Image (cartoon, grey):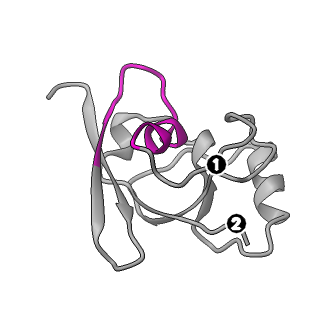
Amino acid sequence: MENMINLFVQQENGERLKLEAPTDMGLSVMEVLKAHELEVQAMCGGMAICATCHVEVLESGELPEQSEDEAYMLESLPHAVAGSRLSCQLRVSPELDGLVVRIMPEA
């Protein structure tokens, strides 16, 4: 379907759950994850001030640069890794087609 991309969420058992996401609605990856009822708290609603939508990017094309707010929040997480991003700060776009993430635990 036109204006749709595929995102994948790697599960604990290694399987990848395929999610379709529209590119023409201005959604964030966090909103797509929540719409599919995945375990993402996103307590601040996408403001980049709580880090409860933390994901590890396992595979991607070109990702947008981190904002200062996102970088600050990620630096404060004791379990952040090299591929850490806040899913609320990743806007669904054609460049994200094929993105593979793992939802990170909160602690």
In contact (CB < 8 Å): disc 2 and disc 1:
yes
Residue 87: horizontal and vertical position, in percent? Answer: 57, 48
Residue 13: horizontal and vertical position, in percent? Answer: 35, 79
Of the numbered discs in the image, which one, if any, rests on residue 41? 1
Residue 82: horizontal and vertical position, in percent? Answer: 62, 73
Q: Is residue 97 or residue 15 the one in the foreground?
A: 15
Q: Quadrant of residue 5?
A: top left
Q: How many marks?
A: 2
Give the quarter of the figure containing the N terminus.
Answer: top left
The furthest residue to the bottom: 13
Instruction: Give yes or no for residue 28 being in the magenta stretch.
Output: yes
30 relative to 1, above or below: below
Q: Is residue 52 left or right of residue 26?
A: right
Q: Dot 2 corresponds to which residue?
A: 106
Residue 33: horizontal and vertical position, in percent? Answer: 46, 45
37 relative to 8, above or below: above
Of the numbered discs in the image, which one, if any, rests on residue 30? none
Q: Quadrant of residue 88?
A: top right
Q: Magenta stretch: give its range.
A: 19-36
Give the amino acid type for the residue marked by disc 2 in the picture. Answer: Glu
Sequence-first tag of 2 and 1: 1
The furthest residue to the top: 25
Q: Which residue is pictured at 33% across the width and 78% down the height?
A: 14
2 relative to 43, above or below: above
Give the amino acid type for the residue marked by disc 1 in the picture. Answer: Gln
How dense is the environment of label 1, judged by Cα within 10 Å: few (below 14), some, or many (20 and up)? some
In 3D space, how far apart are the residues under numbered discs 2 and 1 (Cα atoms)?
9 Å
Secondary structure beneath dot 1 equals loop
Q: Which residue is pictured at 85% across the width and 64% down the height?
A: 76
How dense is the environment of label 2, judged by Cα within 10 Å: few (below 14), some, or many (20 and up)? few
Q: Is residue 46 or residue 40 the one in the foreground?
A: 40
Give the quarter of the figure containing the C terminus.
Answer: bottom right
